[in-house]
Image (cartoon, helix red, strand yellow):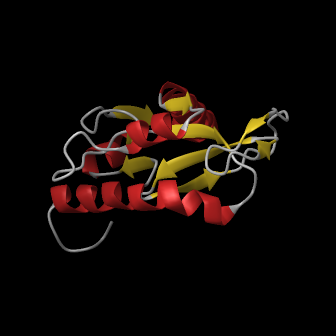
Amino acid sequence: DQREGRGGHKVWDWIKKGVPIRLEVGPRELAADAVSLTRRDRPHKERVNLARAELLRTLGATLDEMQQGLLEKARAFRQAHTRSLDTQEEFVRFFTPANPAQPEIHGGFALCHWNGDDAAIQEVAGPLGVTIRCIPWQAEPEEGRCLFSGQPSQRRVVFAKAY
């Protein structure tokens, strides 16, 4: 990074951009034919010094490892924050903040039966700021009743708040 400015400012700029791996090459690294590597998925002060040849040999595997770790973390988060809801009362309770004056991020993802009628959703979900976030396409058909209209439903969809 040849821009003017202090190192800390440059580092923070790259962190904000979401760069997965930051490589730093300074006078010491040049003299040692090495690089300093920092991974976004690790604490920001955790740094590894690698020989240039080792970096070239391991960079692809490091990116694959990061991707796998992030995917596992996201799946665990989704699993821990997803609930199947079968009544309007459960739905309202799940998405209603404890203190409406200072609504916190709460709830998560709700798997609810829906029969495809958009208008039926608005009466219950609309005031809560909840919308359909995903219609799982690999899910097995599941008999049930639409949470909003009471009509027969063949599938559950994912509801959540957008923040």
State the count of labels. Answer: 0
Q: Pick the quarter of the image with the N terminus.
A: bottom left
- Taking the spot 27% from the left edge, 39% from the top edge, the residue there is 44
Q: Residue at x 18, y 61 (%)?
A: 9
Give the quarter of the figure containing the C terminus: bottom left
Left or right for 132, reference 6:
right
**Residue 18 image position (x, y, % from top left):** 41, 55
| Residue 53 x, y percent position in the rendering | 55, 38
Relative image position of residue 23 (x, y in whole percent): 40, 49
- Above or below residue 4? Residue 123 is above
Q: Residue furthest front?
A: 150
Residue drawn 36% across the image and 32% down it: 48
Residue 34 in sight = no
Name the side, left or right, on which 100 lies relative to 84.
left
Q: Quadrant of residue 33?
A: top left
Instruction: Work out whether residue 77 or residue 136 is closer to the camera in this orientation and state it.
Output: 136
Look at 19% across and 44% down and name the residue there: 99
138 relative to 147 in the view: left or right: right
Residue 47 or residue 54, whichever sits in front:
47
Which percent across, then down, holds residue 137? 80, 45
**Of residues 8 and 71, the one drawn nearer to the viewer in this rendering:** 71
Q: Find the residue positioned furthest to the right.
A: 141
Q: Is residue 88 visible?
A: yes
